[in-house]
Amino acid sequence: MAYWTAKSVPELKGLERKEQGRLFRQCLKEGKKRMGAKYWKLTGLAVLLSAVLAFMLFFFGFFSGGFLGGALLGAMIGALFVFIVQTPTIDVGREWLREQGYPKPENE
């Protein structure tokens, strides 16, 4: 499952939007810290795959160029980063959220 927004993280459901955003950023930060070198390896892999994707699209003539082509390529690269880097980082960061007591019980 990809974590596109703070709303997609189960531990953050039911919180205010501002609080969700703050905890989502903290979750990413803690996940990055806990992953250590693996985070940078995944980032490097995503950059490499992005370059290969761009080259292949250009080489085989699938890249239409212009604004639309750039937007489509950017969307593909963004999705690549979400699946390869952000989702595993948040998975690790969710451990930190649970250590902090999230999700909070309904009674509080």
Image (tube, helix red, strand yellow):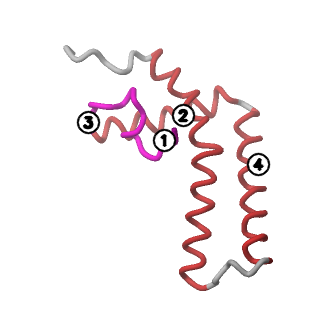
N-term-proximal mark, 4 vs 1:
1
Q: Which residue is mark 1?
A: 3
- Give 36 or 87, whichever is nearer the viewer: 87
Q: Residue at x 35, y 36 (%)?
A: 20
- CA distance separating discs 1 and 2: 7 Å
Q: Residue at x 29, y 41 (%)?
A: 17
Q: Which residue is mark 3?
A: 16
Query: Which is more foreground, mark 1 or mark 2?
Result: 1
Query: Which is more foreground, mark 1 or mark 3?
Result: 1
Labels 1 & 2 near each other (Cβ < 8 A): yes
Q: Which residue is mark 2?
A: 90
Q: Which residues are magenta?
A: 1-16
- CA distance separating discs 4 and 1: 20 Å
Q: Which residue is mark 4?
A: 44
- CA distance separating discs 4 and 2: 18 Å
Callout 3: helix, strand or loop?
loop
Using the image, determine if residue 82 lies above or below residue 99: below
Callout 1: helix, strand or loop?
loop
N-term-proximal mark, 1 vs 2:
1
